Image (tube, rainbow, N blue to C red):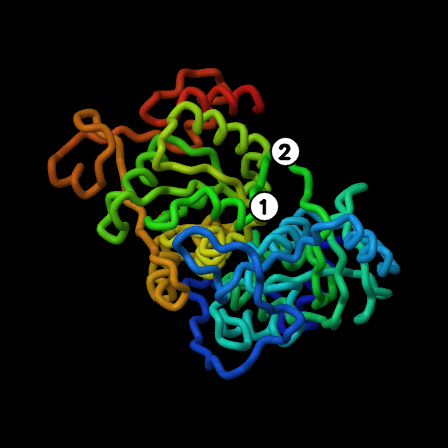
Amino acid sequence: MKLSLAVLSLAATATAFTSVAPARSVARSVVSGDVMAPVSIRAAGTQLEAAKQTPHGGSLVDLILKSDEEKAAAVAKCTKSLQLSPRQLCDVELLMNGGFSPLTGFMDQATYEHVVENVALPDGLIFGLPVVFDTDDEDLQPGDIVLLKDGDRDIATIEFTDKYTPNKAVETSKCYGTSEIEHPGALMVATERGKYYMGGKITGLNLPIRDFPCKTPAEVRETLPDDVDVVAFQCRNPVHRAHYELFTRALDDPLVGKDGVVLVHPTCGPTQADDIPGTVRYKTYEVLKEETHNDRTRWEYLPYSMHMAGPREAIQHMMIRKNFGCTHFIIGRDMAGSKSSVTGEDYYGAYDAQDFAKEKGPELGVTPVPSLNLVYTEEEGYVTADEAKERGLHEKKLSGTKFRQMLRGGEDIPEWFAFKSVVKVLRENN
């Protein structure tokens, strides 16, 4: 029923979701830098800025109140309280800790529409995807100050500035390249998000308590060297041998300076329904960190909910990692890509995200590092697919489907494909 109502709602805002072929491109408009973003969602931060990289917009935002007295006074102003959904909790945390710098709150209508259409804030600063607070509550109104909670824990307060009915058909078409509900991101917008979006200023009270520790951008920056390149590696699945080879070899890319380091920064928030739960993924990362102990590899965790938005999401990831101190970002084949749940066809080309990142990288101030297309060979271990072909090496392959079957069946997993420590965690939590 909810799915049917959601589709009818989208049809009312523009046109109904259609049965057109999956889109292969996204909007890439260039905007003028003359228009200023509303003060309610953008402000300069005062947080310590370590590391080589400058935060997005110039300063790292920190919205978290420091004293109990300040927090009590903020809570006293609230007239209502709301429980945050898992996706909202991730967004609030990244607003509070500066991961979404320069934002200081959820986007108002003007800002939301500008980001959807132009991949940028109203003042021209590049921004990949809108950050919105959704609700079905008819009683919430601009001017309300509301306490945002995660269970019994006070997370933040929000002072709402406006309330609007978004054009979700336009949003999904521009941001995901399609309005088909067979796309998981479009489905999320249609069926999970509420009827209304509301802009509002966030005041942080307490970070969420999670099964996996998520350091703030300022805390991560303090651990990074301030005189070398930092290469971010984003993932939402357990790291296997090919992934490890990929991000360690990225340090040898000509685009990366001498003595650079890798920040492996997995997302541990909500993602696709059939992905491995974040808490299990976290356990695999922890055991792998111990097994591979490498001074040039750092591990941290990001409370981010995936949109599977392909090229637009690649920009969002690069922007967030810029705030965490990264100068470079590894862009894999079909990054943040998704398939139709009906036809199985890809919504994006294999290199759409890489191409968009290369186009926007200079403007964003983050250098995209294309990922190597590695294969395992009997003679030389992992080499690039081109080298294997040129030299006539014998490749060994194991599909994800076959791996999962072997995992469930208790079969031995070849060590060239997966780390023993990771396999052990997956079996224990299967």
Would residue 21 be found to the left or right of residue 92 on screen? left
- Residue bearing the label numbered 1: 303
- Seen from the viewer's position, the closer of residues 118 and 171 is 118
- Seen from the viewer's position, the closer of residues 49 and 214 is 49
> Would you say residue 354 is visible in this rendering?
yes
Residue 84's x, y, as percent? 74, 50
Q: Quadrant of the C terminus?
A: top right
Q: Earlier in the sequence, mark 1 or mark 2?
A: 2
Count of numbered badges drawn on the protein: 2
| Placement of 408 over or under 31, stated as above or below | above
Q: Residue at x 81, y 63 (%)?
A: 145
Q: Which mark is residue 191?
A: none
Q: Residue at x 56, y 75 (%)?
A: 114
Disc 1: CA contacts within 10 A as few (<14), some (14-19) or many (>=20): many
Q: Which mark is residue 211?
A: 2
* Residue type pointed to by label 2: Asp
Q: Residue at x 37, y 48 (%)?
A: 230
Q: Residue at x 59, y 43 (%)?
A: 269
* Residue type pointed to by label 1: Pro
Residue 101's image quarter?
Answer: bottom right
